[in-house]
Structure formats: C-alpha cells, structure tokens
Image (cartoon, rainbow, N blue to C red):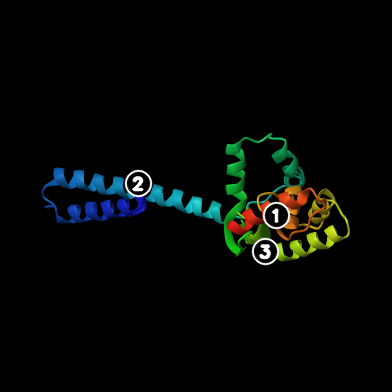
Amino acid sequence: MSRIERLRFQVALAERQFNRVDPDNRLVASELEQRWETALRQLKQAESLHNKFQEQSSQPFLLSAELKEKFGSIGEKLPQLWQEQILSQQQKKALLRAIIDKIVIHRLAPDQIQTRIVWKGGLTTTLKVAVSVGSFERLSFFKEVEELILQLTAEEKTDQEIAQYLTDQGFRSPMKDYVLENTVRSVRLKHGVFRKATQSILGVLLVFLLLLK
C-alpha cells in the first residue's frame, strides 16, 4: 500500500468516526473533527507532491548544445580512457550498466559464440567472438587449415612462415588468437610429412602418440 493510499484510508476512517459520534458530545466531536481535518491536509499535501513529481517526470530532459557536444565526443575518447586504466573497475562496471540493457549469447560452434548487445534505447550490436577449445580438431576450420599446412609445406614453406601466413588469414590455434608454430608442426608430423631425415624417427613417435589419444 502506497503512502497516498494509507492517507486516504486514514481520511475515510476519521470521517466515519466523526459521523458516528454523538453530536451532543462536543468534546469528542471536536477532537474527531480535528483528526479528520489533519488527515485531509496530509492527503492533499501528499497528492500535490505526487502530481508535481509526475509532471516533472513526464517532461523530456533537454540537453544544451554545449552538453550535446561534450557527450558526443565521449564515444571517441572512451576506448582511450578504457585502455589507459583511467577508470576504475567499479566505474567501468557502472558505465556498462548505464549504457547496456542486456547481452544475449548464442553458441554457433564449439570455438565460436555470437554475442548480441542490446543498448539502452533499443539499438543492438552483434559480434562473433572466438573462444578457446581443447584440441585442434574442435576448431570449426581445422580441415581447411590442415589442407593449407600440407599445401604450404609442399611449397617448402617453413613452419614459422606457415604459422604467420595462417595468422594473417585470420586462423588461430585452439588456445591462442594466432597460429602457433607448434600447431603447424604437429599437423605436419601427424600426416607423416617430414622436413629432414632426422625428423623421421621423432615424427613416427609423435604420430604414434597422436594415434593413441
């Protein structure tokens, strides 16, 4: 029950009590009449404050041209402020709560999720975010990467060169956001592709270990 509802109840109660009193009992009637008037006065004050607040809330909040210009430049400076750690963690969280309504996450693949940010005001931003996985085979593009590694190895590219090329093409290793040289080497040896004769024995052992997994 709101404060105004409680005051209305008190006014109605005071009115009933006043109407029921014996008119000849002037002392009691006077006391009940004062209670009734006090309750009415408090109710009118509460209703007046409530109506004033409603009127102010319904009016649009208008920004001056100067404030609009300052707020408009915040978006350009925010990444710099965020990276330079000028804002504390508490301030960052408060800022995010102020501008974000909700975040919807949908897993597209074991190594990729789609994130939809719903901003205050209704606008949305959709992003695809890469996530770590436990093995190379769980990457959604692992077949394509395998073929590229074998193809580039046949072209006598080094593992380092292949790793850099794949990284430049947007690929990555299971636990990193870039392709490791070790990932290239593992794929190559798994398929029995050796660069030197001395790698043959080590390669056979590695392939054997991979097959045991």
Circle 1 sits in a helix, a strand or a loop, which is it? Answer: helix
Q: Is residue 203 left or right of residue 60?
A: right
State the mark number for residue 67. none
In which quarter of the view is residue 73 placed? Answer: top right
Q: Is residue 72 visible?
A: no
- N-terminal-most mark, 3 or 2: 2
- How many angstroms separate mark 1 from mark 2 (CA)? 92 Å
State the mark number for residue 140. 3
Number of numbered tags placed on the structure image: 3
Number of the front mark, 3 or 2: 3
Q: Amino acid at mark 3?
A: Ser
Q: Give how far across and how far down residue 102 sits, in percent.
A: 57, 56
Q: Give how far across and how far down residue 61 sits, in percent.
A: 63, 51
Circle 2 sits in a helix, a strand or a loop, which is it? Answer: helix
Number of the front mark, 1 or 2: 1
- N-terminal-most mark, 3 or 1: 3
Q: Residue at x 73, y 44 (%)?
A: 79
Q: Is residue 209 left or right of residue 200?
A: left
Residue placed under numbered mark 1 in the picture: 204
Q: Give how far across and how far down residue 17 sits, in percent.
A: 18, 53
State the mark number for residue 42. 2
The 10 Å Cα crowd at callout 2, few under 14, some 14 to 19, many 20 or more, is: some
Q: Residue at x 79, y 55 (%)?
A: 194
The 10 Å Cα crowd at callout 1, few under 14, some 14 to 19, many 20 or more, is: some
Q: Nearer the viewer, residue 198 or 97?
A: 198
- How many angstroms separate mark 3 from mark 1 (CA)? 27 Å
Q: Amino acid at mark 2?
A: Gln
Q: Nearer the viewer, residue 99 or 174?
A: 174
Q: Nearer the viewer, residue 203 or 24?
A: 203
Q: Nearer the viewer, residue 15 or 71?
A: 71
